[in-house]
Amino acid sequence: MITILPMEDQQQKKAVLSRYPMLSGKGDVMVMAEKSDILGTVVLSVDGTVLRMYDMTVSGQSLKTLDGMGKMIADSLMRAAASYGETNGAEQVISHVAELAWFFAQKGFLEEAEGMVSPMNRIVHRCKPGAHC
């Protein structure tokens, strides 16, 4: 079974976040895994109404040339990050992962000065109670 969950090991999380001084240790790391095999990670933070993705890894692949499985992993991580952000009040997503600009452009993100930008509702669709979705 594949899972995407916040990193549980707090010391490992602290070590990962220490590589991103702009986060001041306040971000999070989501890990996609199948059993004990890590498939990918995404480093993120929610800053007011903005979800920021600072880094993404896809195990064994270059972000510039993802194969079909790599694209599925990146897409799943992006959607999990967006769901996390939306749950925590984010209305917009900004990717600062320059190597994946091509990937985010395919998903409808627009290139702006800060990075690749998308409104949250392009990724996360919440159903209203009683509505058919």
Image: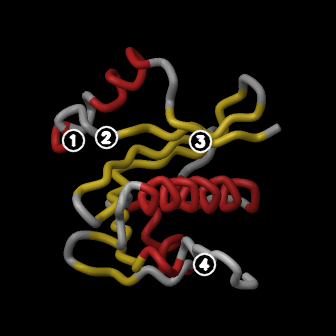
Residue sitting at the far right: 1
Classify mark 1: helix, strand or loop.
helix
Residue at numbered disc 2: 27
Residue at numbered disc 1: 23
Residue sitting at the far top: 11
User: Callout 1, which amino acid?
Assistant: Leu
Classify mark 3: helix, strand or loop.
strand
User: Callout 4, which amino acid?
Assistant: Lys
Mark 1–mark 4 distance (CA, rounded to whole Å): 33 Å
User: Callout 3, which amino acid?
Assistant: Gly
Question: Looking at the image, which residue is at 32% across and 23% down?
Answer: 14
Question: In terms of depth relative to the viewer, which is nearer, 42 or 51?
Answer: 51
Q: Residue 76 at x, y = what percent? A: 64, 57
User: Callout 2, which amino acid?
Assistant: Gly
Question: Looking at the image, which residue is at 63% across and 40% down?
Answer: 32
Q: Which label lies toward us, 3 or 2?
A: 2
